[in-house]
Image (cartoon, helix red, strand yellow):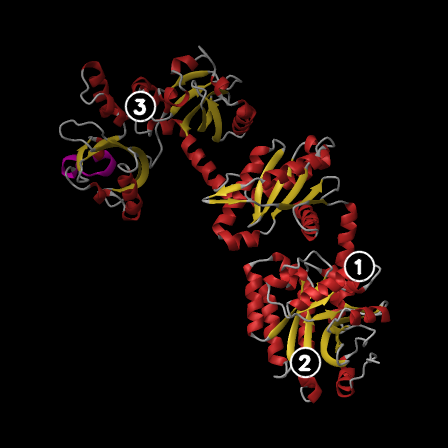
Amino acid sequence: MNTGKTRIQNSGLIKRIFKKHPEPAGELQRDAVDFIESTPHVLFSINTLGQWSFLSSNWLDLTGYDTVQALSNHHFNYIHPDDLCEYKNFYRSLDKDGHRNGTHSVRLICKDGSYKWVLISAKLSNHICDNRSNEIIGLISDIHEETTEKHRLDVKLQSLEKLIEYVPGMIYRCLNNTKWTMEFISAGCYEITGYQPQDLIKNKTLSYASLIHPDDEQYVWNEIQCALDENRTFHISYRIITANNDIKWIWEQGQGIFSSSGELLVLEGYIADITLDMEADEAQKASLLYDDKTGHPNWQLFNDRLNEAIRRSLFDSRYAFVFILLQLDKSEEIASIYGKEVADHLVSEIQKKIAKSFECVGAVSRCNDDTLGILLESIGAFENLNKVIQDIQEVVLLPVQVYEHEIYASASLGVTLNTKLYSGSNELIYDAEQALSRARALGGARHEVYDLKQHAKAAAQSKYENEVREALDNGLMQVWWQPVVCLNTCALTGLEAKLVWNHDRRGILFAEDFVPQLTNTQLLMQLWQFMLSEACQHMNEWKSIPEFNEIGVNIQIFGETLLAADSILRLSERLIESKPSSCSISLGVPEEVFLRATDTVREMLDWLQSRDIFVILDSFGEGICSLATLKRYPLDMIRLHPLLLDKQHCDPRFVKSVVSLVHSFDIPVIADRLSTQAQLDTAIDYDINYVQGAIVSETVPPSQIPEKLRHNLLKFSNA
């Protein structure tokens, strides 16, 4: 049998009459009675106790149970045990969350012990009549055989059309043409479309096709024609524009009605409003793809847009885009001062301001705690890149009010253009990270643009890192030692550990020759862990030498990777464990650490001093470290950069004044990397306390240190 007809007959329409006409009278009453007597369905009502309160006479034919005897019995008793649990859920749902009607298929237990599949179409009555408010009324339809004939439907058609107007949603019959000319539409048309059925029937006022959203018109046509060609039911979801110009999502199910010769006569189907369901789905998708704080794309969606921009640029020569990684400068310091919540809110506010201020911004997304990804999609942004970036920087520099705090921030930007053929977003992001790293290395609050030269540089850097890694794995990295000499006594008073690379082509390379190229890499930490392990082993071997117990040992720190306080503290703990009890330990800390001027640095220095570890301010004079550092931090020594002792590069009077000022704080001064007699003479003239370098003693392998300790073998004498 045709399933479209079955749906119409099993749609639970009888119960709708009692909603509008609780007391039928006259011709309508006779029609209703005739319909009840002649319909194959069982009309029923269930009281609030769940008992049958009315059953039409067809109950006996359907189940074999006497109608009168069944009344006042709980209707659950007639449901097959295997179906009872799901049916109870359906039954209870009729008075839950506004769901007042529905259908459910179950097996009914017959008197002879067999069962029949039936479709129960039920509705919660909302009328107060004969004290029967909240009763369940409905139909039970025998679907065990599915034998309803078309002629029976035709006989009942007039009665059904009176009832069909109460069906939720919209039942229709239409022609298969581009206008979807309607021959019949149920009363639910008005609730869904805002138009009365007569407005659409025969295209009197407008056609149904004119309601379909323009973007969905072709889709609807293609899907229905495909289903007709395959002689199957179609199920489609699409948008319509209502009489109020609202956009609604609807779900349509239908099929073609064919003649005995196979000719398509009409389409019949059902349309329901699913706007609320679609909006809920969209809201759920939005929660997964958008930042709930800013409403902007999250990194997953942003990454998809980057890939789409890359694909588009490959096929459209007129399309240009710019990708920027923006990282907040000193974000850790902001978090330590104001708290992580304030720092997080600051980044979100900057993200909102950037998205609002620039029309060319295609998307802004949060990459991590302090970094934003920005996609610029316009020729204007590409051609006026410097102006756009300057404007972005100015937006970041504006003060941001976060709770009771007014915070000033700056940012570093890594910029990539689509001038390179990228294969995917990962490659694009990597290049932006390289540019961002360079911007931060140059002091921050600036931008760097990645280009092909930088690409070649990155490739060379990768090759260089692999070479260093292989040298470490193959035992070509060593720890040598350089003596430190007291100018007053001309005696060896200290040893400094030096990381050495025994390069197969370039010979012996010291840390200052190759470590700067490894800044901000994980490889740097591996090198210093190796150096520390070797230095501790050497000190353990020299503990038996009496002269070793009277000198100091210095470990110099290179690279930003080791500037974190926890790294320095871990390094210091291992040194304390390895040194002789009378041996002093010093750490050479670069100027960059002190330039950060955070509480963490102060705590780190206090911790070191509490462990009797001396702190040396390294390479003083190389950077922009303020003399105020001498007063601000507890320093034990200062080591001058060798350029300060070169009279051609620095005014001797200035250097002598600096040394005198340092001495006024009772801080000794070390002259580093002295290689000429002139530099040594200058150190003596400036009353510098300690010297080290080739002019005093070469850096030597650990095997030569015991001899130097025992016999004080130095090039320098106080002659």
Q: Position of residue 270 (x, y in %)?
A: 41, 26
Question: Badge 2: how crowded within 10 Å, few (<14), some, or many (20+)?
Answer: few
Quarter holding residue 530: bottom right
Please give the residue where the numbered disc 3 appears in the rendered image. 166
Asked which secondary structure carries label 1, the reply is loop
311 relative to 212, above or below? below
Q: How many marks?
A: 3
Asked which secondary structure carries label 2, the reply is helix
Kind of residue sitting beneath label 2:
Gln
Please give the residue where the numbered disc 2 appears in the rendered image. 537
Query: For the magenta stretch, what is the residue range?
Result: 60-70
* Residue at x 82% of width, y 68% of height: 679
Asked which secondary structure carries label 3, the reply is loop
* Residue at x 50% of width, y 38% of height: 295
Quarter holding residue 464: bottom right
Please give the residue where the numbered disc 1 appears in the rendered image. 651
Kind of residue sitting beneath label 3:
Tyr
427 relative to 503, above or below? above
568 sits to left or right of 244: right
